[in-house]
């Protein structure tokens, strides 16, 4: 088990449309965030849920 990676889930929310998802992995959350912003120009927030 990797004890260096943060635990919890990551909540991705678009402030301009209905995109909203939960991820167990920070990299997956960041991938969605960057792809959505690149495709739409929308404002996206990512937060960690403990």
Image (cartoon, rainbow, N blue to C red):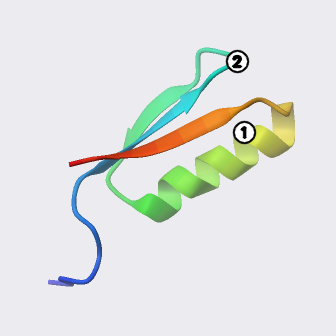
The answer to which of marks 2 and 1 sits earlier in the sequence is 2
Near-viewer residue (43 or 27): 43
Give the quadrant of residue 17: top right
Q: Residue 1 placed where, x, y %? A: 14, 83
Secondary structure of the residue carrying tag 2 is loop
Image position of 33 (left or right of 27): right
Q: Residue 45 placed where, x, y %? A: 57, 37
> Looking at the image, which residue is at 77% across and 40% down?
37
| Neighbours of disc 1 within 10 Å: few (<14), some (14-19), many (20+) | some
Q: Is residue 6 above or below residue 33?
A: below
Question: Residue beneath label 1, please?
Answer: 36
Q: Residue 29 placed where, x, y %? A: 50, 51
Image position of 41 (left or right of 22): right
| Neighbours of disc 2 within 10 Å: few (<14), some (14-19), many (20+) | few
Secondary structure of the residue carrying tag 1 is helix
Question: Residue beneath label 2, please?
Answer: 16
Q: How many marks?
A: 2
Instruction: Determine whether label 2 and label 1 are within 8 Å by CB.
Output: no
> Looking at the image, which residue is at 38% across and 38% down?
22
Image position of 1 (left or right of 21): left
Q: CA distance from mark 2 to mark 1?
A: 11 Å
> Looking at the image, which residue is at 58% across and 24% down?
19
Near-viewer residue (6 or 20): 6
Q: Residue 13 placed where, x, y %? A: 53, 29
């Amino acid at each position: 088990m990797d004890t260096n990676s943060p635990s919890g889930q990551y909540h991705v929310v678009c402030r301009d449309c209905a995109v909203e998802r939960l991820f167990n992995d920070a990299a997956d959350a960041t991938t969605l965030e960057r792809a959505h912003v690149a495709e739409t120009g929308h404002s996206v927030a990512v937060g960690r849920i403990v």
